[in-house]
Each structure stands twice: as C-alpha cells, then as structure tokens.
C-alpha cells in the first residue's frame, strides 16, 4: 500500500524540484500555489490566501474569471495559432476593438511586455530616421533612472538596476538616462535634436510604486510635442484599470504618441501584449521589418477582447479608484501608529508601503521580507521590492468587504512585526 505524500513534503518537493532543475533567476516567497479563483489563491495544502500581487498586475480581472475560462476553452477547440503567414478570423476584430477602445489608428500585437517594449523601441528609431530626419544610427531614446521595462539585452541597456544589467554587456547604445519625475532634466535632454522618443512608466512599479508629481506626465507630453519627440508610455503594469483609469496616462489629460500594453490585457490567461500608435508612426513598419509567430494569434485575440469587456462591464476602473482611496487611508493609520512603517503611496489599486529595516533586540533581522512572511502566515500574499518596499496590488474584482479584511490582516501582521 502506497502512503500519500504529506502536505509538507509536497510543498518541499515542489520547491526542491524547481531549485534543482530551474534557473535561479527568481527568489520566490516560500509558498507553492496550486489553484486560484477571483481574489484568492490556494496552496498545495489547501490553505487560502488573498493575492495582493496579482502576478505583477496581470490578473486584474481575478484568477480564472469564468468568462475567460469559457472563451479559452471554446477557442482552443476551434483554432489557436495560424502565424501571420495567413489572415485569421479573430485578429481583424481584435485590432478594431482595441484601436477604438484606446483611441489609436493602429495596433501591433505581440506576446510579452518586454516584446512590446522592444517593438516600440524599434518603431521609435525608424520613425526618427524616416520621419524626423535624424542621421542613420544616431537616434537617441530618453529613459528614466529606476525604470523597469523588461530584461532583454536592449532593454537592460537602458536600466540603472544592477541586478538587471550586471555582466550582460556589451550593451545597446542610444539611450540617455535622466532622473524620474524631473521636468527640468527632461527639458534639457530634449534639446538634443537626435532624440526620437521618451520612454517612461506613468508610475514606476518595480521601483516601488514611485508616483510622480500630478503634472509630470502632462508636462512631459507637452514638452515632447514641442520638440517633435515621441512620448511612449509603458503601461504594461499601470494599464487596464489598475490605477483607476483604463490607462494611467488618462489621469494627465494628455494623450501619448505610443502606448505599450501587456499583462492584464489577457487577464493573466495567456501572454498578450501590444503597441498602439497612429498611422503616422506605425506606418514605418513594413512587411518583414518586425513580427512574431504567436503575435495576434486567434487564442490571444479572443481572450483579450473578453478580458477588456470584463474590465468595462464590471467597472473595474471605478472599483480601483474608489477602493484605492480606502486602502491608502487604512495604511496611513499604520504609518501614524508604527514608526517602522514609513509611508504609503500609490494610485488606484497599485500601492506600496515602505518598511524600515532594522534588527530586533534578539538579533533577528526585521525587513520587508520578514513582514511578507508574516502576511503569508496570516493569509495574504505580497512581495518585497528593492528590499524595504512591499507592493500591494490585489485583483481589481476585490470588494470593499474583502479589502477591509485584508487591511485587518496587514495591520495584524504589522503588529506582530514589532
């Protein structure tokens, strides 16, 4: 008679297998997830947690939304991939849908956020040569310190994060780095006539939910227009209702030249990303100049349209806007009560709390990582970034009652952390 594997050994077995056979390019929280639905995930022990990371804001519509599961199953039984060697019956409708939804002439479909960023970089450079008249191979793209746009060779060439770019050189040339949230620095960088684009996150998510001044994005877009430079908004994490608007840049009242989307475009069901721009920019791409075998496949198109329908019909932007204010108000009470909770910041349901690292009297380290372990033990999953910052980003389908329960879990964990 075979004995069933104990829960603890199932957890440990999964971790050990990944550690042994998987590359060590992540440092996961020690919990093994097995199932998800809505705002909840369950581990292999059957313990339930509130998911407050949402797969880095990819699961805005909640885990395994029934409509998305249904769409995926139906499409899987029809056709999933044709490549762009042929037309397919879903891509045209998908392209029309997203262009009308976001207000642009054209879209270019890709799969991952990093691929979409690479697409935008290529497009900006070619636009610089063919439309702005920059000398060949001289185009520059302005980026910001602390950015996170992905981890391809070209993208890390624009990064200031040593974890991302150490020992991966030689790096791609053509990037100018300025401080984030610094209009004067941007204005000076834009004096260079060889600049073709400014690539920026409306809120720097990976940097710790760094929210710029209210007028930063609007002023930056206006400056770029004056200098005939493309303003390219990386909305891979901030887009699709996360900050209380369908696009975070909508808060500025200005319209980017280029929008980069990914993650929640598919509700976490499938890798789907895109670049949006008007004809005058997008037309620099010609047959053979860019592509992707999976980009715009029927499965992706079907899921993305359903995922965006859910955002609109379930009013997820409005929910994120309303509950975000409540969450920050609750967290501010912790800031005022506990000296090691330094500040809370965010917009909509993209928020972060800064924790002061210290050493307890018994020599035990006290950092954001240890607090996240307490949160896990109490039934809520979140993850530190940059050592002292905890990002809180639940699925946007969360209710006020659930949010308040989560605030109580966070408060309990912070007290235990003392």
Image (cartoon, rainbow, N blue to C red):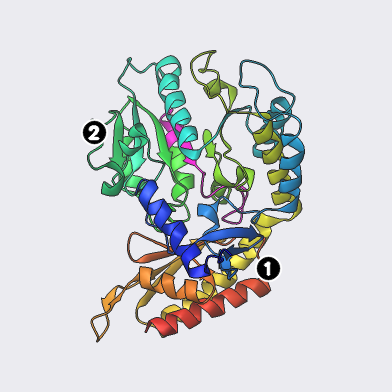
Q: Nearer the viewer, mark 1 or mark 2?
A: 2
Q: Is residue 186 left or right of residue 55?
A: left
Q: Which residue is mark 2?
A: 169
Pointer 1: residues within 10 angstroms few (<14), some, or many (20+)? some
Q: Compared with residue 214, is residue 304 higher up or lower down, i.e. above or below?
A: above
Q: CA gap, disc 1 to disc 2?
A: 46 Å
Q: Compared with residue 405, is residue 289 higher up or lower down, i.e. above or below?
A: above
Compare residues 149 and 365 and report the one nearer the observer.
365
Compare residues 124 and 10 and report the one nearer the observer.
10
Q: Position of residue 391 (x, y in %)?
A: 45, 62
Q: Is residue 231 among the parts visible in the rendering?
A: no
Q: Compared with residue 220, is residue 119 higher up or lower down, i.e. above or below?
A: above
Compare residues 79 and 159 and report the one nearer the observer.
79
Q: Position of residue 308 (x, y in %)?
A: 69, 44
Residue furthest front as drawn: 1
> Who's the residue at 49% across and 46% down the image?
218
> Who's the residue at 32% across and 63% down the image?
387
Return the mark for residue 210.
Answer: none
> Who's the residue at 72% across and 47% down the image?
69
Range shown magenta: 224-246
Q: Which residue is mark 1?
A: 399
Pointer 2: residues within 10 angstroms few (<14), some, or many (20+)? few
Q: Compared with residue 322, is residue 256 higher up or lower down, i.e. above or below?
A: above
Q: Is residue 268 left or right of residue 290?
A: right
Q: Position of residue 247 (x, y in %)?
A: 58, 47
Q: Quadrant of the C terminus?
A: bottom left
Q: Position of residue 306 (x, y in %)?
A: 73, 43
Label 2 secondary element:
loop
Q: Quadrant of residue 30?
A: bottom left
Earlier sequence position, callout 1 versus callout 2: 2
């Amino acid at each position: 008679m075979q004995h069933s594997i104990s829960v603890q050994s199932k957890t440990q077995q999964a971790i050990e297998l990944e550690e042994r056979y998987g590359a060590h390019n992540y440092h996961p929280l020690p919990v093994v997830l097995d199932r998800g639905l809505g705002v909840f995930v369950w581990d292999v022990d059957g313990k339930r947690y509130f998911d407050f990371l949402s797969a880095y804001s990819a699961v805005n519509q909640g885990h395994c939304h029934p409509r998305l599961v249904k769409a995926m199953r139906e499409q899987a039984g029809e056709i999933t991939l044709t490549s762009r060697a042929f037309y397919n019956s879903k891509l045209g409708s998908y392209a029309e849908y997203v262009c009308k939804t976001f207000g642009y002439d054209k879209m270019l479909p890709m799969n991952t956020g990093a691929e979409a960023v690479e697409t935008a970089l290529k497009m900006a450079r070619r636009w610089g040569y063919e439309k702005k008249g920059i000398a060949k191979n001289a185009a520059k793209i302005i980026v910001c310190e602390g950015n996170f746009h992905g981890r391809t060779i070209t993208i890390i060439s624009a990064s200031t994060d040593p974890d991302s770019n150490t020992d991966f050189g030689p790096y791609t040339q053509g990037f100018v780095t300025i401080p984030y949230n610094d209009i004067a620095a941007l204005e000076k960088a834009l004096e260079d006539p060889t600049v073709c684009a400014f690539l920026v996150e409306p809120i720097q998510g990976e940097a710790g939910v760094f929210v710029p001044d209210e007028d930063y994005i609007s002023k930056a877009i206006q400056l770029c227009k004056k200098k005939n430079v493309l303003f390219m908004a990386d909305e891979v994490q901030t887009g699709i209702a996360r900050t209380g608007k369908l696009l975070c840049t909508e808060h500025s009242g200005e319209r980017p030249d280029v929008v980069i989307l990914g993650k929640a475009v598919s509700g976490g069901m499938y890798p789907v990303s895109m670049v949006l721009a008007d004809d005058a920019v997008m037309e620099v791409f010609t047959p053979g100049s860019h592509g992707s075998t999976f980009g715009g496949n029927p499965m992706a198109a079907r899921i993305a349209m359903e995922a965006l329908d859910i955002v609109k019909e379930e009013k997820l932007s409005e929910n994120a806007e309303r509950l975000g204010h409540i969450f920050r108000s609750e967290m501010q009470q912790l800031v005022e009560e506990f000296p090691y909770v330094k500040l809370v910041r965010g917009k909509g349901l993209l928020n972060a709390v800064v924790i002061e690292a210290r050493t307890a009297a018994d020599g035990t380290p006290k950092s954001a990582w240890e607090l996240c372990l307490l949160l896990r033990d109490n039934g809520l999953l979140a993850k530190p970034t940059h050592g002292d910052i905890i990002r809180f980003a639940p699925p946007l389908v969360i209710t006020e009652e659930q949010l308040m329960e989560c605030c109580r879990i966070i408060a309990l964990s912070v007290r235990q952390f003392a």
